[in-house]
Image (tube, rainbow, N blue to C red):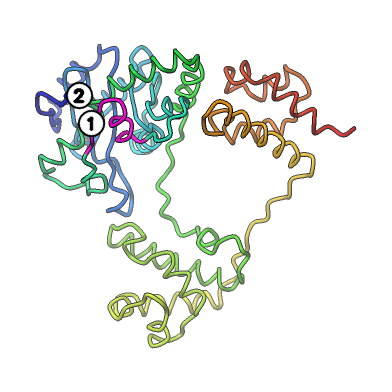
Amino acid sequence: MNIAPSKPAVWVNTPQGLIEAFQALEFQPRIAVDTESNSLFSYQEKVCLIQISSPETDYVFDPFEFDDLSLLGNLFKNPKQEKIFHASEYDLICLKRDYHFTFENIFDTMIAARILGAPQVGLGSLLQKYFEITLDKKYQRANWGLRPLPPEMLDYARLDTFYLFKLRDILESELTTHALLDLAIEDFFNACKAAGHANGNGHDACWKLAGSSHPDPRQVTILNELCAYRDEQAKKADLPHFKILSNDMLVNVSIHRPTTLDELSLVPHFSEKLVKRHGVGLIRAVARGETAPLVMRAKNPRPDDAFIARIECLKDWRKNTAKKLAVESDVVLPREMLEQIASANPASKPELKLAMSNSPIRYKKFGSLILKELKKTENP
């Protein structure tokens, strides 16, 4: 199917251009939205492009050129205008984090495809399936912070919104046919609540790097100092952590605990270049870790046996139900909701309805079945 763009995208990087684009978009019943960020190239990830399409025109906004993007925020929070995304969670997190936007009335084509049980839900896979279009993903991991942006990257970026209108209509039709549209609408509504997380480039993730096998606390304390050193270097260079030193490198250093540059050079994957660049700093970090107060893992209380029994019972029911519906398990019951129900331990429909207040459609579809499963875990 040949539905390629017939005219160039509009590059928006001036106040007047922003006003004109907003005026062209504000009364559209639907717009398609996507973003590009630079997490692979910067210490603090930030939104580098905002793509917004109408059925007639594709706009690509350069957020670096604006101190105020509230006009776009007016589009995103308008409940009367549908915003079409593919895999909205990351886009919403980034836009909320960087601009404090709020969102209402979205349609997420990836969520729709998952609810329909599609085996592959990436945008490229869906466009191939429905339109026999093959997206060139050449620039998927490109540096979107480049300026000026090469024309071929601009053309690439606009395609992530250009096709969403036709894809959205097909998926809505299939959801309606399979009586799943109400469930999708519920998930679209809940997707709008995604939190705008701060950039996570701190150095407090030593336990995550060390793993869950309860390693030596002194080793973890050394690893914590190594993470702090890497974070400092990444901030100075304005690069992501992995472009300074990999997680595996830090873990290996914490295990070998070198005290000299010669010992550091024997640690796996440490080239002469890396030893020259980071050797002194790493040796000093190891030394600090050898004498610093031990970093201890916070202990979470073990759930009681009854709670665990409810969790396992609901997981088994969810798995079997998902298999019958040919969807992923979390389409039937998201993990957070499963845990919330198990924690609340509802004994009646009103109690379960309260525990599932964020998902009235799932309560309507599955509430009686969930209560039946929970009764199996009651003590005789």
Q: Residue at x 74, y 42 (%)?
A: 308
Q: Position of residue 32 (x, y in %)?
A: 28, 24
Task: Check disc 1 and report the residue beneath it.
Answer: 133
Please name the predominant secondary structure of the magenta segment in the image. helix
Amino acid at pointer 1: Ile
Residue found 30% across the figure and 20% down from its top: 75
Neighbours of disc 2 within 10 Å: few (<14), some (14-19), many (20+): few
Element marked by disc 1:
loop
> Residue at 55% across / 25% down in the picture?
325
Front-most of residues 98 and 371: 371
Amino acid tagged 2 = Met
Above or below, 349 relative to 97:
above
- At mark 2, the secondary structure is loop
Q: Quadrant of residue 371?
A: top right
Q: Are marks 2 and 1 in contact (CB under 8 Å)?
A: yes
Q: Is residue 96 above or below residue 216?
A: above
Q: Residue furthest right?
A: 380
| Region in magenta | 122-135
Q: Which quarter of the figure is the N terminus placed in?
A: top left
Indicate left or right for 230 with 127 as reference: right
Dot 2 corresponds to which residue? 1
Disc 1 packing (10 Å; few <14; some 14–19; many ≥20)? some
Question: Residue 55 appears in which quarter of the rendering?
Answer: top left
**Depth check, front residue: 362 or 131:** 131
